[in-house]
Image (cartoon, rainbow, N blue to C red):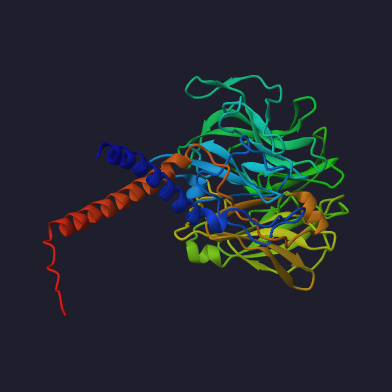
Amino acid sequence: MMRSVRKSMIAYPVAVSLLTGVAFAVLVHPVSGGPVPGDRVPGGLTLPWMWQATVQQDPPGPASVLVGGDSVGFEGTDLFDSEGKVAAVGRGGDYRMLRYSGWNGVTPGEDVLLSPDGRYAAQEWLEGSTSDGDGLDIVDLATGRSVTYDGGLTRISDQWGNATVPCCAPAAWAPDGRSLLVETFGTDYEDPQTSIIQARRRLGLLDLATNRITPIGAERPGGAVRKASRGAFAPDGRHLAVTAGDRLELIDRTGKVGWTTDLGDRRHLAGAGAFSPDGSRIAVAELDGCLDACDRAALATRRWRISYLDAATGRPADGPDLPVVTAMSVRALGWTAGGELVVTRHEPERDARKRPDQEWSDTGWEQTGHITLVALGAGGAVRTLLDPPADVLTLDVAADLIRAGRFGGPTPVAGAFPARPIIGFALVPVALLAAAALLVVRLVTRLVVRRRRREPPRPMLITG
């Protein structure tokens, strides 16, 4: 009897473990790996797991895209693991996460920028980094290590007396990947329309080799410039087009202004990829539709037309006749060698609403309900390059793949392993259900056995 009890004590947890493992294996088997896209922008994406390994745990190598959204894999849950995450999709097919504790609305293409060769991600702050909010982190996706830059700026005190380094939010990578256009933070002010305390902003050119910033232009109110239109580098990296209020300026790397032109409130620098491949033209996105007091329907029916400025003079210029795009917004990522302009197309989220007195980003995480990557060709051709799952809301793409026109790669599948320790929280419910199921089976089996033992033996019938 004792041997039977001991055997049962050992067999039960082993059976629970086996059943848990089998159930989990069945659950993750369909998404335990996938094809390798290589040096191509994938033609599709899957959603990351909540416990997806981080870049620091298992670096994915150079990425083709950075993606963010509002699925459980990007946000965790309210009970645990509540945070914002961005997935770096490596060219080997691995999905690895950059984590931002308490910052759900992190936006690739605005707050986090992928370097032109896909190897580095630049962000204002990364959980676990040495910056702790005081600098710009450059994360090496091939090694998992990060370096923090403060631009050599002196600490300033905010409205609560806390001393912080006023550096930096990334705005655009230089083509050679050795410098970035960044936003630095100045003194606080109160917005007269909203009464919100904000920090004034100023653009600067951060040289990564020297950790020094060259200031560009004057301070401006925070939130006064469309994030997708803060600036763009010319292909040679020697000049930049930057937005200052309703004006567009061409400047060189020393901060010297070459020309200034007034765009008004309906025209914007198209994005960080606005310069044509030969550097002669700058793409401008012109809005036809609702500007200020807009509900979702009005935002969804906005129309965007691409026009051009001469990069040498700032005057209107001729250029390819690209199709008009109907969307809440568009953001230009760059041109292909074949002459297509690659843009992200943003549709509004379900209850999106724009008011004149609010800080609002028409390419942001909170405002976007769906995003697609499309190529606009001369003569009205529109090519969908990537239409990700509905829960993917933000996207950035490596510029080298755009220039080479490397699209349509196979869809990499987010593998469940390697995993963060948070996977234990996912396994606990499975283990409990498995234990409960085994307990029910065991109790039913015992009841059946006991009932059979209590039944009187049936008399034998002898014939013949």
Q: Position of residue 140 (x, y in %)?
A: 71, 35
Q: Position of residue 387 (x, y in %)?
A: 62, 63
**Drawn side of residue 78 relative to residue 106, left or right:** left
Q: Position of residue 4 (x, y in %)?
A: 29, 41
Residue at the location (64% across, 28% down)?
135
Residue at the location (69% across, 33% down)?
218
Quarter of the picture holding the N terminus = top left
**Drawn side of residue 446 relative to residue 255, left or right:** left
Residue at the location (79% across, 57% down)?
335
Q: Position of residue 388 (x, y in %)?
A: 60, 60
Q: Is residue 387 above or below residue 140?
A: below
User: Which of 289/369 is in front?
Assistant: 369
Residue at the location (34% across, 46% down)?
432
**Drawn side of residue 195 relative to residue 339, left or right:** left
Q: Is residue 102 visible?
A: yes
Considering every residue shown, the one lying at the far bottom of the view is: 464
